[in-house]
Image (cartoon, rainbow, N blue to C red):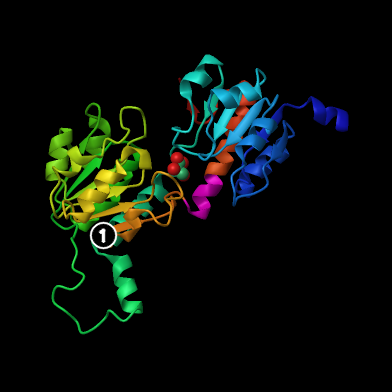
Amino acid sequence: IQREMSTLPRVYVTRQIPPEGLKILRKSGQVQFELWDSDDIPVPRKELLQKVKGVDGLLCTLTEKIDAELLDAAGPNLKVLSTMSVGFDHLSLDELKKRGIRIGYTPEVLTDAVAELTVALLLATSRRLIEATHEAKTGGWGTWRTLWLCGYELANSTVGILGLGRIGVAIAERLAPFKVRKFIYTDVAPRPELASAINAEYVSFDELAKQSDFLAVCCALTPETKEICNKNLFSKMKKTSIFINTSRGGVVNQEDLYEALSTGQIAGAGLDVTVPEPLPTNHPLFTLKNCVILPHIASASYTTRDAMSSLAANNLLLGLRGQPMIKELKL
Ligand code: DGY
């Protein structure tokens, strides 16, 4: 058995992923894998560089930077990379392409969970839920007051989506029953098929800023979208508007956001993602009542994380067999 095992392709799994995925790898009998056996701390870089030496496949999460240094450390055996995430800004795509390494990722299975959380964050921010529970618990709740803890409602509002993809559509579908008046979006080009499903109008970036009562960022982080949400955007937004980001922290210039929130240029922000992650507890954004910050939990439902884990495992196994993956990122 030992001899048989040693001829199997070697895989390194950078995290204790949810059990479904590990079961699939184990039961496959197709690979021998080693695991960084913790969910609490990511594998230290030095350890990772050691562990990837000579592996045929790598299953990672969004906390591992897959760059030239790591790929060089892995060496030429590495043929398949499977990330348990829909985002791929932690991957150096050029370097992977250069080496002919195939990439699996996990779109679609997390769309519902992310859309749900985005709606929850939007409502928590616009109706000031975190501030309100704090007041209730700490003695701030005096008599019923006419304008105390007032926020902004979705009914009759314009909701803007920056980057219309599956997740943006799923968010709009969930918000529509709240009697949103109009959906608008911007992207590199109109996406009529997706937009028609939610009756959304394509507008320029500036119009998106000007018209949105709620602006939800749903784009991927790329060199083009890095810090696209900056002074220029915030200065055009309404003073009563709410900014929501469940994509990647890197799309926002956080100093500019702090400025916009603290000077009342916009009414509030809800962020599930920041730079860095975790955001240091002494970060200025944490001092603002009108900023709700979550620790990157948009896809964190049991069902979704199991589905992501299984998909990542299956992508890896299919890739190692030289077959099409279920979800492959084609470069
Ligand atoms: C992703 O998959 O990219 C999310 O950020 C975490 O689920």
- Tell me the quarter of the picture where residue 54 sits: top right
Counting from the top left corner in percent of width and height, residue 98 is at: 52, 15
- Tell me the quarter of the picture where residue 165 sits: top left
Magenta span dominant secondary structure? helix
Q: Which residue corresponds to the image point at 23% horizontal and 83% vertical from the top-left? A: 142
Q: Eyeballing the image, is 259 above or below 166?
A: below
Q: Which residue corresponds to the image point at 26% horizontal and 31% vertical from the top-left? A: 193
In screen coordinates, is 50 left or right of 230? right
In which quadrant will I find the N terminus? top right
Q: How many marks?
A: 1
Does the magenta run of residues contain 305? Answer: yes
Report the image quarter containing ligand 1.
top left
Task: Tell me if the residue at label 1 has its CB under 8 Å from ligand 1.
Answer: no
- For residue 109, say whether it is visible: no
- For residue 154, say whether it is visible: yes
Q: Nearer the viewer, residue 163 or 94?
A: 94
10 Å crowding of disc 1: few (<14), some (14-19), many (20+):
many
What's the amino acid at mark 1?
A: Asn
Q: Eyeballing the image, is 273 above or below 98?
A: below
Badge 1 is on which residue? 290
Magenta span covers which residues?
Answer: 300-307
Q: Nearer the viewer, residue 85 or 257?
A: 257
Q: Which residue corresponds to the image point at 57% horizontal and 43% vertical from the top-left? A: 309
In screen coordinates, is 197 left or right of 62? left
Counting from the top left corner in percent of width and height, residue 118 is at: 34, 51
Q: Secondary structure at mark 1?
A: loop
In screen coordinates, is 41 left or right of 258? right
Q: Which residue corresponds to the image point at 16% horizontal and 41% vertical from the top-left? A: 209
